[in-house]
Image: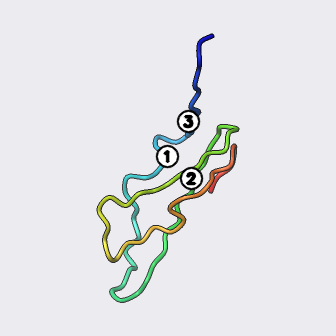
Amino acid sequence: MIPIHAYPVINSKKDSLLPSKIDMGSGCKVGLSYTKTVDIESNCPVTFEYEIKDLNPHPDIRVSHASGDLLGNQNS
């Protein structure tokens, strides 16, 4: 017997799973809060756990839902 381990991956139809830049638009004003939503999608039928780690935290930028489950063939 030979043990085999399988690690499914999220195959994204897009060029990358997350954008390298997020444009908040030119209408942002100092002192106000703005929100931008980025969907993570999976075209794999397996449920994944995800965790987003902030390696260089910034006091003005916050990521919510930094961990959770991404259900197979759905987006979050």
Q: Is residue 41 left or right of residue 33?
A: right
The residue under label 2 is 40
At mark 1, the secondary structure is loop
The residue under label 3 is 9
Q: Is residue 71 left or right of residue 15?
A: right
In three-dimensional space, the C-alpha distance between marks 3 and 1, rounded to whole angstroms, equals 11 Å
The residue under label 1 is 17
Q: Quadrant of the C terminus?
A: bottom right
Q: How many marks?
A: 3
Q: Is residue 72 left or right of residue 4?
A: right
Which mark is in front, 2 or 3? 3
Looking at the image, residue 14 lies above or below residue 19: above
Amino acid on which disc 1 is placed: Leu
Amino acid on which disc 2 is placed: Ile
Pointer 2 local density, CA inside 10 Å: few below 14, some 14–19, many at least 20 = some
Looking at the image, residue 62 lies above or below residue 10: below
**For residue 53, what is the image quadrant?**
bottom left
- Label whose residue precedes the other's in the sequence (3 or 1): 3
Q: Determine whether label 1 and label 2 are within 8 Å by CB.
A: yes
